[in-house]
Image (spheres, coloured by chain):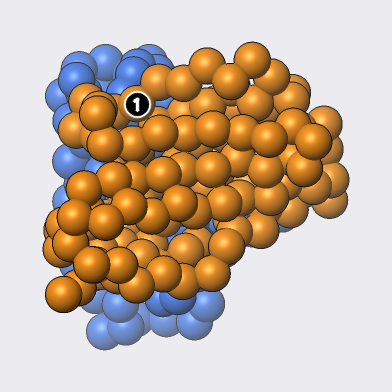
Amino acid sequence: EIVMTQSPATLSVSPGERATLSCRASQSVSSNLAWYQQKPGQAPRLLIYGASTRATGIPARFSGSGSGTEFTLTISSLQSEDFAVYYCQQYNNWPRAFGPGTKVDIK
Amino acid sequence: QVQLVQSGAEVKKPGASVKVSCKASGYTFTSYYMHWVRQAPGQGLEWMGIINPSGGSTSYAQKFQGRVTMTRDTSTSTVYMELSSLRSEDTAVYYCARVGSTSCYAYWGQGTLVTVSS
């Protein structure tokens, strides 16, 4: 079973600044890695799939990179609506697994 | 457009069972597997299992084996998740989720809060 970890647990960022979130898999998941954004009281929203492809309607300030076991989500210039929790998820193996999340809050 | 509409919140006593529904629309119901994911209060996302709406086959996370049953009704385009022998740790929001053109979750239900309390 693959275990996903994320760092940091909380990231405090000022609006307009860059945010870099990390995700690690306990074994290779190739590029089968997705990122989701979740705001309070809402279902998660798919941001990135295939480690680096933005989902439909996702702004270009969101970008993903990595393969194998190390992945990064970068938000180039944080907007007010980007303060949320971000989860990575592997879909290379069963069972599917999510990371514990990174909360991005306002500095 | 794809829509997944779930049943309303439930309050159950320890030891009881709960059955949550997820009604799909906007696509061919039998063409996409449906997953169930849960989220305890203030916690992360946990994958529970998957059902093939076409044939009804299922696969469950080991943690829930023996306690969870996923079924479907093709006449109403609805999938169900039943969890038995509820305990307080099962208090969570339960989501149905469907993959898109890739194997990740492009579509989510609105979530159903299940509270287990005596």
Q: Write down the colour of chain A.
A: blue
Instruction: State the residue position of label 1.
Output: B60
SS category of the residue bearing label 1: strand
Q: Label 1 is found on which chain of the structure?
A: B
Name the residue nearer the viewer: A78 or B116. B116
Query: Looking at the colours in the rendered structure, which chain would you say is drawn in orange?
Result: B
Q: Is residue B77 left or right of residue B38?
A: right
Q: How many marks?
A: 1
Name which residue type carries label 1. Answer: Tyr
Residue at 77% across / 43% down in the picture?
B76
The quarter of the image holding the C terminus of chain B is: bottom left
Relative to B109, B60 lies left or right: left
Of residue A102 and residue B92, the one placed in the foreground of this image is B92
What residue lies at 26% left-to-right and 56% top-to-bottom?
A: B16
Q: Position of residue A7 (x, y in %)?
A: 18, 51
Would residue A105 be seen by someone viewing this image from the given angle?
yes
